[in-house]
Image: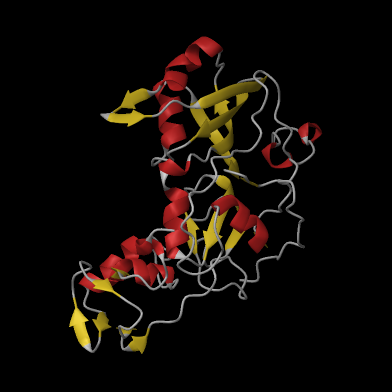
Amino acid sequence: MDKKDTPDAPARIAKVLARAGLASRREAEAIITAGRVSVNGKRIDSPALNVGPQDRITVDGKPLPQPEPARLWLYHKPLGLVTTTRDDEGRPTVFESLPEELPRVVSVGRLDLNSEGLLLLTNDGELKRKLELPSTGWLRKYRVRVNGTPDDTMLIPLRRGVTIDGERFQPMEIAIDRQKGANAWLTIGIREGRNREIRRALTHIGLSVNRLIRISYGPFQLGTLARGAVEEVKARVLREQLGGPAEPGRLTGRPKARSAPTAKKGGPTRDRHAQDSDSRKDRTAGQDRQAGHKRAKPTSPSR
């Protein structure tokens, strides 16, 4: 482990706030520039400051909480929730729907209002940042229903990578699962997760998305987790996937570049959560959970 990665090494103030679970690093920088943070009794307004364990940090006059061990949860996000702590339009949020017993958590990436499926939650801002980085190499897989009749020729540009409105999208992994009337189901894998990336890419080739379900994020899978339910990832599994101990400030290993099994090209992905709502007969068995990850009884939302 590099000296700069040890828990006692000086670190940027925003990183320390994120590591304590107070906010994401970006949110922590906003808290600092708003003048809400003091170090050794002196108010600061710039995140360009390194601090160590000997420094006294307060936020809004309250001591910074000690970092807790990093934890990770799987959450099955339903439709109609925004992935933000507050919404200016008054729409219901993911965090308002979580069980009361959960600690303060932040989301790893986002799912928009009209998307559903697997959303990772963590109490550790630094872990959030690590899992969001494209350099992790983790594949994020989605089941997508589109209006149209796609064929392999149509999908070639997306498999090669396209530029849309000046923004370069990396190559996608796409399999056509089945065609049902005017709609088709696709399985799509991406590694960057840009804003509305899949919807924009499919619109670019003339396909309209009418349902989008994230079924996996790297090795973590939605499986049969009920809508609105939360399940914690075991500390052992988290350590294995991150290549280091699940302790505050010690998640320094690079996440393993693993992904969920890829659907066979041209064949349906058997996922209970990707059923076609037009027919109950299309219900199929849920995906297998990751080996070694024994399911705990899901916690139903209480808010």
Residue 72 located left or right of residue 280: left
* Residue 54: x %, y % from top left: 33, 83
Residue located at (63% from left, 38% from top)? 260
| Residue closest to the eye, 300 or 167 | 167
- Check the image and report above or below for 49 versus 263: below
- Check the image and report above or below for 154 versus 272: above
Q: Quadrant of residue 84?
A: bottom left
| Residue closest to the eye, 23 or 7 | 7
Residue located at (53% from left, 37% from top)? 139
Q: Quadrant of residue 6?
A: bottom left
Can residue 217 be seen from the camera position used here? yes
- Check the image and report above or below for 199 versus 104: above
* Residue 113: x %, y % from top left: 48, 49
Residue 166 located left or right of residue 3: left
Residue 25 located left or right of residue 270: left
Q: Quadrant of residue 195?
A: top left
Q: The C terminus lies in which quarter of the figure?
A: bottom right
Residue located at (43% from left, 73% from top)? 20
Residue placed furthest toward the top: 153
* Residue 212: x %, y % from top left: 56, 38
Counting labels gives 0
